[in-house]
Image: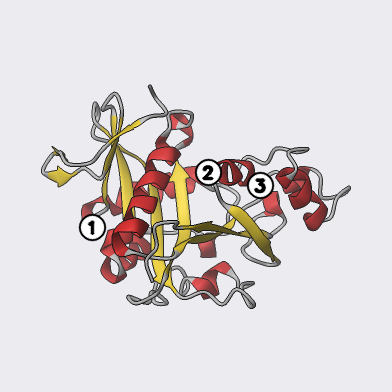
C-alpha cells in the first residue's frame, strides 16, 4: 500500500495535488515561496556532509521557483501539514559527449539561471526526504511526479548527477569506476545509486569533482532515464 500512488486530480489546502500515496497520507504539490524555509530545513537535514556553498537555501529555492516553477516539487504530510520532502529540476539540452560538469556550473551556482525553457531534458538537481520520514515511499512519489512532468512536456527524459554516497567507505580499496561497476552488477549496494538503477535509470559515466561531499569523495555518477513516450 505504501509504495503505491494515487493519481492526481484533487487538492489539499487549496493546492493542486500532483501525486498522492495510496493511503492519502502524503501528497506532492508544486513548491511555492512560503515553503522555502521548510525546503531549506529539509535540505540541511538530508545533506549534513555537503559544503555550505552547495546547500540550497531559501534564496536558492525562490530562484528555482522564479525560473521554472513547474519543476519544483514538495511532499506534504496531510495529517500535520508539514513539508517533509522535495525535488528540484530544470530543463536543459544535454551534450552526452561532454557531460562531466560540476554541479554548481550545471545549475548556475544553484540558482537555476542555466534553465533553458526549450531544453529537451529534465535535469534532476536535487531530491531529499527528511531523515525522519524515510522508508515511506516519498522519493517514489517525487520520481513519479517528475516522470509525469517529463511526459506532459514531451521531454526526452531525465538526467542527474547521482551521489554515490557509499563510495567513501570503500574508496581505499576500489576506484570509483570499480565501485560503480560493482553496484551495477549488484555486488555492492549504494544508498543512492542502487535505488536509481532500480527505478530504470542507466549509468552514463562518472563526474569527478561534481560537488564537495566526502561521503562520495566528491564524485557524481551521470545517470539517464529515457521517456519512451517521447514524440519528436
Chain-order first, disc 2 or disc 3: 3
CA gap, disc 3 to disc 1? 30 Å
Q: Is residue 227 left or right of residue 117?
A: right
Chain-order first, disc 2 or disc 1: 1
CA gap, disc 2 to disc 1? 30 Å
Chain-order first, disc 3 or disc 1: 1
Asked if 140 appears above or below 43 in the picture, the reply is above
Task: Using the image, tell me which numbered label, if any, was put on residue 53.
Answer: none
Asked if 9 appears above or below 70 in the picture, the reply is above
Secondary-structure class at tag 3:
loop
Whether residue 186 appears in this view of the structure is yes
- Tell me the colour scheme of the image: secondary structure
Task: Please tell me in which quadrant of the rendered image residue 188 appears.
Answer: top right
Residue 142 % position (x, y): 39, 45
Residue 85 % position (x, y): 38, 42
The reply to whether discs 2 and 1 touch (Cβ–Cβ < 8 Å) is no
Task: Using the image, tell me which numbered label, if any, was put on residue 33.
Answer: 1
Q: Is residue 168 left or right of residue 153?
A: right
Task: Using the image, tell me which numbered label, if any, was put on residue 165.
Answer: 3
Task: Please tell me in which quadrant of the rendered image residue 112 appears.
Answer: bottom left
Give the residue drawn at x 53%, y 65%: 53
Q: Is residue 139 left or right of residue 220?
A: left
Secondary-structure class at tag 2:
loop
Amino acid at each position: 500500500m505504501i509504495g503505491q500512488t494515487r493519481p492526481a486530480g484533487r487538492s489539499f489546502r487549496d493546492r493542486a495535488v500532483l501525486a498522492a500515496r495510496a493511503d492519502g497520507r502524503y501528497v506532492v504539490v508544486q513548491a511555492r515561496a512560503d515553503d522555502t524555509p521548510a525546503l531549506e530545513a529539509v535540505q540541511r537535514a538530508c545533506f549534513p556532509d555537503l559544503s555550505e556553498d552547495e546547500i540550497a537555501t531559501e534564496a536558492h529555492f525562490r530562484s528555482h521557483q522564479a525560473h521554472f516553477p513547474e519543476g519544483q516539487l514538495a511532499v506534504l504530510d496531510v495529517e500535520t501539514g508539514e513539508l517533509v520532502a522535495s525535488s528540484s529540476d530544470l530543463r536543459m539540452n544535454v551534450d552526452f559527449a561532454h557531460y562531466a560538469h560540476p554541479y554548481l556550473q550545471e545549475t548556475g551556482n544553484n540558482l537555476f539561471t542555466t534553465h533553458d525553457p526549450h531544453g529537451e531534458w529534465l535535469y534532476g538537481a536535487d531530491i531529499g526526504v527528511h531523515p525522519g520520514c524515510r522508508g515511506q515511499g516519498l522519493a517514489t512519489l517525487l520520481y513519479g511526479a517528475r516522470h509525469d512532468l517529463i511526459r506532459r512536456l514531451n521531454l526526452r527524459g531525465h538526467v542527474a548527477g547521482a551521489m554515490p554516497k557509499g563510495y567513501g567507505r570503500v574508496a581505499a580499496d576500489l576506484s570509483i569506476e570499480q565501485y560503480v561497476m560493482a553496484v551495477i552488477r549488484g555486488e555492492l549496494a549504494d544508498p543512492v545509486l542502487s535505488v536509481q538503477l532500480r527505478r530504470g535509470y542507466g549509468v552514463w559515466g562518472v563526474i569527478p569533482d561534481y560537488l564537495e561531499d566526502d561521503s562520495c569523495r566528491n564524485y557524481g555518477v551521470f545517470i539517464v532515464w529515457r521517456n519512451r513516450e517521447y514524440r519528436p
